[in-house]
Amino acid sequence: MAIATPAAQIATTLGSYLDLLDRHGVLAGLARTDAAPAADPHALAVTQVTCDSRAAAPGTLFICKGAAFKQSYLESALAGGAVAYVAESPFPGVDALCVQVRDVRLAMGLLADAAYDHPSGKLDICAFTGTKGKTTCAYYLRGILDAAAGGTARTPIFSTIELDDGIEAGPSKLTTPEPLDLQRHLANAVASGARRLVMEASSQALKYGRVTGTRFAVGALINIGLDHISPIEHPTFEDYFAAKLRIFQHADTAVVNLEANDEHIDEIMAAARAASPRVVTYAVSDPTADVALLAARPAEQPGATLATVRTPSFTVDVAVPSVAEFNLSNALAAVACAYALGVDARSIAAGLADVRVPGRMETVDLGNPEVTGIVDYAHNGDELEALLTTVRRHYPGREVVAVFGATGVKGVERRVGMGIAAGKLADRIVATEDDAGTEDAAAICDTIVENVRAQGNDRVQVVLDRTEAIRTALAETHGPAVIVVAGKGHEKRMLRAEGPVPYEGDAEVLARLSSELWG
C-alpha cells in the first residue's frame, strides 16, 4: 500500500486572508511603516502561515501569539522571508506589514483552517468534551468506526493518549492541538483517505479557539463537574461551563448525556438546541433518552459487561470491555455518536467488544491469582470514588489498596477529594507524587493523609517516589487484594520542579515489580 503524502498548505495571497479576517469581524486594519511595501495585498503571494519563527521562509505570513512572545521572534521570522505579520498591535520599529487583529487566537484559528483548505469539511469528525471519560469514549467510538470500515484502515484519533492522523502517529503533546497543528493533522487525515475521525476537545481548546473554523459532524458533551477550576485553567465553574458549551457551535449534530449534570442539564440542552441543527440524547437511567440503556449484566467475556442499548432505529447488545458502571455511560456516548453518524448495529456490537483503553480501568497481570492490579487515570475525588466503588463491588472480600497522589499548582481541591474518597473506600493507602511541579510533593501528600484520617482511616503512609510507593503496596500485600494505582493512567513522565522527567508508567512498574516479587 502506498504511503500518503503529508498535507501542505495552499498558496494564496495576503488579500485573501485579509478578506477572511474581515468577514469574521477580526481584522482591525493593515498597518504599514515607511519601509514596508505599499503593494496591493491581493498581489502579495503567501505560501505559508506559521507561528514558528524557525519555520519562516519567503512568502510566510507570521502570527505573533502567546503570552511569552518576544519581538525577537518576529524579527527572526522577517529575516527568514516573512512578508507580513499578524498581531493585535504593531511592534515599534519593525519595518513590515502588520495585519492588525482584534483577537490573535481567533485570527490564528481562521487562518490555519484556510491555509489547509478547510479539512474538517472533508471529514466526518466526532469530538467529545467532558470533565471525565473523553478518552474512553474516543477509543470506544474508534473501535466502532474501525468495524464499520471493515478493517480496511485505522480511524484517525486525536486523544490525550495518542495522536494518529493516518500519516503521522505518536504520543500526544496536548489533548487538542494548537490551531496550525490541528488543521495540519486534519489535512493529513484527509490525505490518508480517511472518511471519519475521532477527537477530544478540551475546555482550554474550546475556550481559546483552537478549534475555530473546524466543523464537527458530531459534538458530544458527556458530563461536566467541578474540576479544572484554578487560576491557570478556568477561574470559575461558570467560565469552565461556558467553554464546554462551545462545542455545540461547531457541531452539525449535538450529542448530550441527559445525566451530564443534574443542576445544569436544562442549560446544556438549551445551548445544544440553539447551536446545532440536530440533537441526540443518551442516558443510562433515563428511558426518555434517544439512546438508552435497557439492561446490563456480566458478560461471558471476563472483565466485560453485556449491555442492551436502544436507539431510535434499532436495539443492540454490546459487550462493554469494562466492569465499571461509569463506562456504561461512556459506551452509550459512543453508541449515540455512532448512531448519529449512521453506523449500523452490527458494527457497533463488533467494534466495542475488543477495545483497550491504555490507563483507563486497565487490568495488569501481576502473576499472582490472589492479587489484581488496576491502573486508572482517576485524578480527582469524584473519579477516585467511582473507581474504588466499582472495585469494591466487583472484588468483594479482597483488601483494596490505593496508590495515588495529586497534582501541584492546578486543581488544588483534588488532594482533598481524593483523600476523602480513599479514606472511605480503601483499606490501605500509599500517598505519593503525581506531577507536583513547583509545589512540594510532601506537602500535597500531607493534605491527602489529613483527609484520609478524617474519615477514620489510619492505614495510610507516604512514599514520595512513585515507583517505590508501588513497590511498598505490593510488598505489604499478603492476601487476596486489588492494588489500584490512580492518577497518571498512561502517562510516561513526571512533572517536578526542574521540569518533566521520564517515568516508566504505572502499568509497567506494576508488572515489573510484581514479577520481581512473585516471579
Image (cartoon, helix red, strand yellow):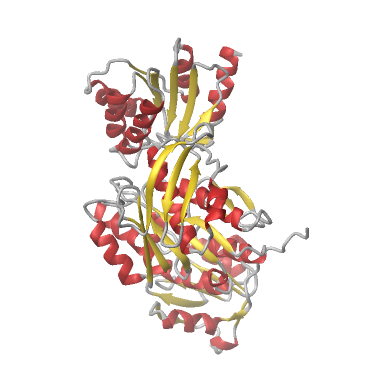
Q: Which residue is outermost to the top?
A: 478
Residue 336, percent from left and from top: 43, 57
Residue 408, percent from left and from top: 36, 36
Q: Residue at x 41, y 24 (%)?
A: 395
Q: Which residue is outermost to the right?
A: 1
Q: Nearer the viewer, residue 167 or 311?
A: 311
Q: Nearer the viewer, residue 119 or 413?
A: 119
Residue 241, percent from left and from top: 29, 56
Q: Residue at x 38, y 44 (%)?
A: 295
Q: Is residue 395 left or right of residue 172?
A: left
- The quarter holding residue 265 reads bottom left
Q: Is residue 413 above or below residue 427?
A: below
Q: Is residue 51 above or below residue 454?
A: below
Q: Is residue 266 left or right of residue 20?
A: left
Whether residue 491 is visible to the viewer of this picture, yes or no, is: yes
Total count of labels: 0
- The quarter holding residue 380 reads top left
Residue 170, percent from left and from top: 61, 48
Q: Nearer the viewer, residue 187 or 77?
A: 187
Q: Is residue 287 above or below residue 83?
A: above
- The quarter holding residue 157 reads bottom right
Quadrant location of the C terminus? top right
Quadrant location of the N terminus? bottom right
Q: Residue at x 28, y 15 (%)?
A: 458
Whether residue 156 is visible to the viewer of this picture, yes or no, is: no
